[in-house]
Amino acid sequence: MRNTLAIFRKVWLYAFLLLAAAYCVYFGMGQLHQLDRPLQFSAPAALTVIVMQLSFWLVYSWLWSMLTAKVAGTKLGLWESFRQQNLLMLGKYLPGKVWGMLARGAAMRQRGISTEGAVVATCTDQLLVFHAALIVSAALYWWLTRSAAAAAFVALSLCTLGLAPLLLRLAFVVYRYLTPTGARQMSAPFGIPIYLAFLSGHCLGWLINGLLFSGIYYAFSNATPSLSALATLVLANTIGVTIGFLAFFAPGGIGVREAATSGLLLTAMPLDQAIMLTVLFRLWLLSTDLLVGIPALLAARTKAAS
């Protein structure tokens, strides 16, 4: 049994990366046929895409580093945080959506973070991601429409500002008393002021991700940027990504995210152009996950083994 566990610890990351990479390549090859219309190319917009991608990685790596320090008592370096976030990103391509969280949890355990700390940090992170998506969507929807329904959406999202951390505390109390005695010594999650600080960071992350999505659009089209168009693109991307994540049956939200995003973009562009944009964005994400994420993970693994 010990030999089996030792072998598993050595090969699990490689098996995980191989499965995720195989699915990424399979899906990417299947999408290439949809790129059947001529594409424009804008070098300044393409540079914006690269800047937004780097900014997105930096913001989310920093947020995860700060979150593990507050919740689990261990502050990760940016490189290690980036490595763990890549495990999460690649894991979403495997059926079930939980494999990235499990892989990241295993990496956290290697850094001395307890199982309980990993669970609490992961749950807090996911709550922040969804809560920030709600805030960003509500604000953009109101800015675009100025309607009563949008105002109600904003009011609802603001009402959740005080409720979310309280629910998090309640969930932690329940979890703490369902775990072994050692876990009961853990401190409670942070309070509302710190929660709001993390929430602001995640809102910034959603905006950067939306600008990355917008950059893909302007890099391969001759459209003229405008504030309303950018707001529509960021809103569609935020809602589409969130819906895709909630579609647990679809690895990476593939298909579901694209359909939701394309439908929301119909007010700003024709359907065929919206579909083209979502395909290009998905291919960009697959490429960065494969060409940057996997080498980063393997490099970290090699360094740890040496």
Image (cartoon, grey):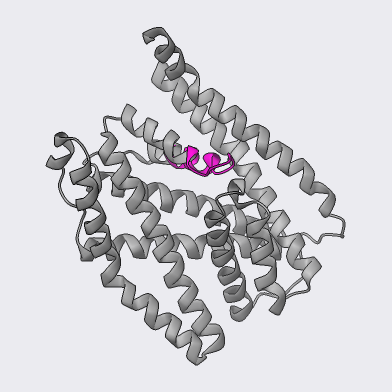
User: Which quarter of the rendered picture does the C terminus lie within?
Assistant: top left
The answer to whether any part of residue 44 appears in the image is no
Is 151 in the magenta? Answer: no
Is 90 in the magenta? Answer: yes
Instruction: Identify the residue shown where x is 56% and y is 30%.
Output: 17
Instruction: Identify the residue shown where x is 43% and y is 40%.
Output: 101
Residue 247 location, x and y as percent?
Answer: 57, 55
From the viewer's side, name the closer residue of 121 and 299. 121
Is 272 left, or right, of 142 in this rendering? Answer: right
The answer to whether any part of residue 281 appears in the image is yes
Residue 258 location, x and y as percent?
Answer: 67, 59
Residue 222 location, x and y as percent?
Answer: 77, 69
In the displayed orientation, state which residue is furthest to the front: 178
Residue 83 location, x and y as percent?
Answer: 45, 36
When asked about the image quadrant of residue 36, the answer is bottom right
Q: In this view, does 44 lie above or below 289?
A: below
Instruction: Identify the residue shown where x is 20% and y is 56%.
Output: 190
Is 139 left, or right, of 188 in this rendering? Answer: right
From the viewer's side, name the closer residue of 97 and 57. 97
Q: In this view, does 196 lie above or below 116?
A: below
When asked about the image quadrant of residue 162, the answer is bottom left
Magenta segment: 84-99
From the viewer's side, name the closer residue of 92 and 223. 92
User: Which quarter of the rendered picture does the N terminus lie within?
Assistant: top left
Report the number of discs. 0
Is 275 left, or right, of 190 in this rendering? Answer: right
Q: In this view, does 29 lie above or below 22?
A: below
